[in-house]
Amino acid sequence: MSTAARLIILVLIAYTAMQPLTTNADTKVLNILSLNQPGSGSRYEVISLENVGTPDEELVVKGNRTTELGPPNSEGLIIMEITEFTADKTGYHAHTRIVAIPAAETRLSPGALMSAAG
Ligand SMILES: *[C@@H]1O[C@H](CO)[C@@H](O)[C@H](O)[C@H]1NC(C)=O
């Protein structure tokens, strides 16, 4: 095998080995937090480093949190406040909306319900 052919094979192997790294090169997830407290609310948060290795590299926190504003009403709906937020180098941005969600969706998962009933 010629030196050139060996070099090409080596480069191909290196390239293949680096694939998983290069696909995620611009965003590196540092931490994911997911909390759910039925009857109270939930919190979901992702902390990541974006544009890794570039002059635009920055730490970004994105997520949402929900707060149940009371017990289910007569139609079985829970009024809930949902806030979606992002914190990056431009500051903290949040958007809040109020929704009505069927109580069952905020409570136990179907699997958990079944084992609780059985
Ligand atoms: C919060 O964000 C996560 C991830 O994007 C999503 O799965 C979840 O549905 C969101 N929750 C609400 C209440 O929007």
Image (cartoon, helix red, strand yellow):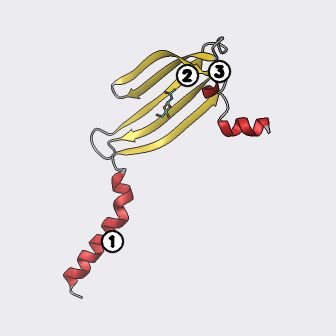
Residue 88 versus residue 76 in the image, above or below: below
| Amino acid type at mark 1 | Ile
Q: Which residue is mark 2?
A: 66
Query: Is label 2's Cβ within 8 Å of ligand 1?
Result: yes
Label 2, label 1: how far apart the Cα atoms are: 47 Å
The label shown at residue 82 is: none
Amino acid on which disc 2 is placed: Thr
Type of amino acid at the residue the image marks with label 3:
Ser
Label 2: which secondary element:
strand
Report how far apart the C-alphas of labels 3 and 1 lie in the structure.
Answer: 52 Å
Quadrant (top left, top right, bottom left, bottom right) of the N terminus = bottom left
Q: Are marks 2 and 1 in contact (CB under 8 Å)?
A: no
Left or right, residue 9 beside residue 82: left
The 10 Å Cα crowd at callout 1, few under 14, some 14 to 19, many 20 or more, is few
Q: Residue 61: which quarter of the image?
A: top left
- Residue bearing mark 1: 13
Name the residue: 42% across, 18% down: 95
Q: Report which residue position mark 3 lands on.
A: 40
Q: Is residue 74 above or below residue 15?
A: above
